[in-house]
Image: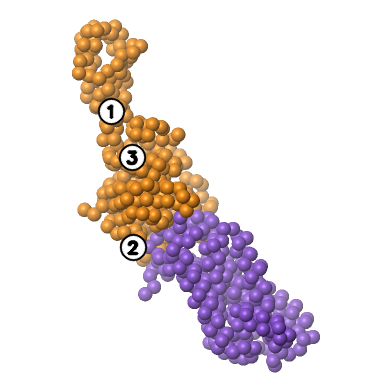
Amino acid sequence: MISTGFYTFVTRELKRFLSLYNQTLVPGLLTTVLYIVVFGKSLGSRIGDIKGHSYMEFIIPGLAMMNAITNAYSNSASSLFQAKIMQFLDDILITPLSGLEISLGYIIGGAARGFINGILVLVMGLLLTDISLAHPVLIVVELLVVSWAFGAVGLLVGIFAKTFDNIQLLVNFFLTPLVFLGGIFYSIDMLPPLWRNISLFNPLYYMINGLRYAVLDIADTSPVVSFLVSVAAAVIFTLAGAILFSRGYRIKE
Amino acid sequence: MTPAVEIKGLYKRYAGGVEALKGIDLVVGQGEFFGLLGPNGAGKTTTIGVTTGLVRITEGSVRVMGYDVVSQFRQARQLIGLAAQELNFDWFFSLWDLMILQAGYYGVPAKIARKNAGRLLEEFGLSAKRDVKVRALSGGMKRRFQIARSLVHEPQLVIMDEPTAGVDVELRHMLWDYLRRLNKEGRTIILTTHYIEEAELLCERVAIIDNGRIIADGSPAQLMAGIKRDGLSITVEGWSDQAAAGLDGYDYTFKDGRLRIKVVQPERRLADIVTRIAATGAVVNDVTIDHASLEDVFIELTGRRMDD
């Protein structure tokens, strides 16, 4: 049963990013419109169709996943880090909430922001292109699972981070390259064999591939494998974050 | 009756190797107004941190109303209201939202949370500010809000860590009155302070902590009586051997026309002493009653002042 304390903490996490919608929801949407216009409309016509879809339609699931991943990560990482650095995390730590509940609260906040951002991109795609959603339930599940996984990554980084730069570092040097190399803008079937094989070691490739299947009904790799990779990431990062937080690592002295 | 707080063999060593607590034993009874006194860095905030779950225990145990703060942390923390020394607040929300959130974290139903929040903001003169964010408040208002928020879930054990640090005299007196009232209502209060007069004025019992150890524990009167600093200072004209003989039985010194007598409860002995001196023909020009303070107790025990 969900306790009042846990419900209150989750509410706090949701209110936090919803009240800052111009920083947490609008920018991702604007960036997506730019990607669709610049890459989809101007370059897309030169590339032609990919697996039966226009280039603009092809990139929309990847853009949705990129938005979900970066927003889910940023939300939990910055929320926890701000609370740590401004020292109001103590207000939560002195309450009857357990370390697990607080961890899950941060992850849920991140997952919610990631999910909403992903859905908003898809809605934008529906408005700007002719795509129809092939597997709507799977879209929701894929976005939720991946957002959850990166909400948990954000929690982990929030625990370890000593400065804001530490949080941005992961985005610049890890998340953004992996997302871009994960096939947002191309099918890995278009790559030479060596790069194609290297791409298979990128977990974000499977997440983007999974959502592309759910939205467009096309996939480079088995959608089941893609989904399992997403679930595995969610489980591993959640366990790691919750265990470290509950033990008070870099949280309690 | 189960003690409000029972600390046994508490030892805390921080990651850097600093030993903040070196085996503390302490019992605070339910309904007590208890003071934890000590200089900066003595271990007061670490003791509070361990009790409230902010600091991990290296060795020993802490129980709140019988509940172990580690294995039964939910029950223990439910009973505690902490107003921390540092004024750090969640900067995303208004005062009202912060009160409601804090109550919610403790499982207080929304209706009761709203009632308590409204009452406390009113009592602390913050009703007009309920919709502003904390960063818009003055230092004194932040302190009032800190205390109001710590009480929103109606805790049985109220812990105030240096609540009057840096506040003006008016607010200090308001807070003292408020804490007395809470204590009369039956709440146990633990006050940490390095203001000696605050502890003397408010606390039924104090423990003095220094360098991670409790070095004294008792009522302020007991502790001050223990060091035998109470007495009288009397300026005497015409001091003689006869006058000295008249003070047989008293522990006194006479130097440069000033008579110093060590005596417990000097007010009660004043008339007797003055009568004895006057009977010898000497003249009493001036009398000062000296009382020991908790500062004297600290100096007696450590050889230095609290603020050194």
Question: Reading the chain from its start, which is encountered first: label 2 or label 1?
Answer: 2
Q: Amino acid at mark 2?
A: Ser
Can I make out residue B112 in this image?
A: no
Q: Which chain is orange in the picture?
A: B
Q: Quadrant of residue A114?
A: bottom right
Q: CA distance from mark 2 to mark 1?
A: 44 Å
- Return the residue nearer the eye: A86 or A132: A86
Mark identifier at residue A200: none
Residue B295 placement (x, y as % from top left): 37, 33
Q: CA distance from mark 3 to mark 2?
A: 29 Å
Residue under label 1? B228
Pointer 1 with pointer 3, Cβ within 8 A: no
- Return the residue nearer the eye: B151 or B75: B75
Q: Amino acid at mark 1?
A: Lys
- Callout 1: residue from which chain? B
Category of crowding for the residue at label 3, using alpha-carbon neighbours closer than 10 angstroms: few (below 14), some (14–19), many (at least 20): some
Q: Which secondary structure, mark 1? A: loop
Q: Which secondary structure, mark 3? A: strand
Say which residue appears at 25% left-offset and 20% top-offset.
Answer: B251
Q: Quadrant of the C terminus of chain B?
A: top left
Comparing labels 1 and 3, the label whose residue is closer to the camera = 3
A102 sits to left or right of B238: right
Mark identifier at residue B215: 3
Residue under label 2? B71
Question: Reading the chain from its start, which is encountered first: label 1 or label 3?
Answer: 3
Q: Amino acid at mark 3?
A: Ile
- Callout 2: residue from which chain? B
- Return the residue nearer the eye: A153 or B87: A153
Tell me what hue chain A is rendered in: purple
Say which residue appears at 20% left-offset and 15% top-offset.
Answer: B248
Residue B224 placement (x, y as % from top left): 29, 32
Q: Is disc 2 on the same chain as disc 3?
A: yes
